[in-house]
């Protein structure tokens, strides 16, 4: 019954969107992002999701909810298999930024990357950058994951700058 930040920001006229991993409940629709103040949600709700297949615990878990209180008959499971989650999340965030009506109110975008959490997976080209290092496979993969996430954050930042939104943006990293 707690009020969430996006619910509070709605009263201030903010447009509120969520992209990425949601780890704040999913046993009931009322726990899902669009029931907790977000106008849209693109991402997953379970832990330990595969970065490429988007499956967790043997089930595909990747969805798009395009409006508030998007539950049965609205919430769509999307097939993004084979695409790396950091790229998908950055692209979705950039689409939201590009489509945001600058005259229609401020934007609250909660972008929660899956990287650098387990399972340790990354496109080969990011891991390959560290082949000359005397590092373990795990460390090279982890460094690749971080490099890819850094690139994705850079792309989102560039989109904010291109739209003239950067100077009025607060970024919180955790």
Image (spheres, rainbow, N blue to C red):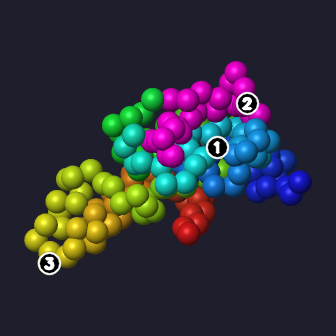
Query: Which residue sits furthest left?
Result: 132
Q: CA distance from mark 3 to mark 2?
A: 49 Å
Looking at the rendered image, the quarter that the C terminus falls into is bottom right
Q: Which residue is mark 3?
A: 134
Q: Which residues are magenta?
A: 54-78
In this rendering, the label closer to the viewer, 3 or 1: 3
Residue 12: say if magenta. Answer: no
Instruction: Quadrant for residue 100, please give it.
Output: top right
Comes first in the chain, label 1 or label 2? 1
Q: Nearer the viewer, residue 148 or 76?
A: 76
Instruction: Residue 113: tell me if it is visible.
Output: yes
Q: For the view shown, which residue lies furthest in the front direction?
A: 58
In contact (CB < 8 Å): disc 3 and disc 1: no
Which one is in front, 124 or 41?
A: 124
Relative placement, left or right, of 81 versus 98 is: left
Q: Is residue 8 left or right of residue 58?
A: right
In x, y percent, where is residue 40?
65, 37
Pointer 1 with pointer 2, Cβ within 8 A: no
Q: Position of residue 158 (x, y in %)?
A: 41, 52
Q: Is residue 46 above or below residue 42?
A: below
Residue at the image position 22 percent from the left and 60 percent from the top: 127
Kindly identify which numbered label has been placed on residue 58. none
Between the C-alphas of marks 3 and 1, the distance is 42 Å
Helix or strand or loop: what does disc 3 sit on? Answer: loop
Residue assigned mark 2? 71
Q: Position of residue 161 (x, y in %)?
A: 46, 52
Q: Residue furthest right?
A: 1
Q: Secondary structure at mark 2?
A: loop
Q: Which mark is residue 17?
A: 1
């Amino acid at each position: 019954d707690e009020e969430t930040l996006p619910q509070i920001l709605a009263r201030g006229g903010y447009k509120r969107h969520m992209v990425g991993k949601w780890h704040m409940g999913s046993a009931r629709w009322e726990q899902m992002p669009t029931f907790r103040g977000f106008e849209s949600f693109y991402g997953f709700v379970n832990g330990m999701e595969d970065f490429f297949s988007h499956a967790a615990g043997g089930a595909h878990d990747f969805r798009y909810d395009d409006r508030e209180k998007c539950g049965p008959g609205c919430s769509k499971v999307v097939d993004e298999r084979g695409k790396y989650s950091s790229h998908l999340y950055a692209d979705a965030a950039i689409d939201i930024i590009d489509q945001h009506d600058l005259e229609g109110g401020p934007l609250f975008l909660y972008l929660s990357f899956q990287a650098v959490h387990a399972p340790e997976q990354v496109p080969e080209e990011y891991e390959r950058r560290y082949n000359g290092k005397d590092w373990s496979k795990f460390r090279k993969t982890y460094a690749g994951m971080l490099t890819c996430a850094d690139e994705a954050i850079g792309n989102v930042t560039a989109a904010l700058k291109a739209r003239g939104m950067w100077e009025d943006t607060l970024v919180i990293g955790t």
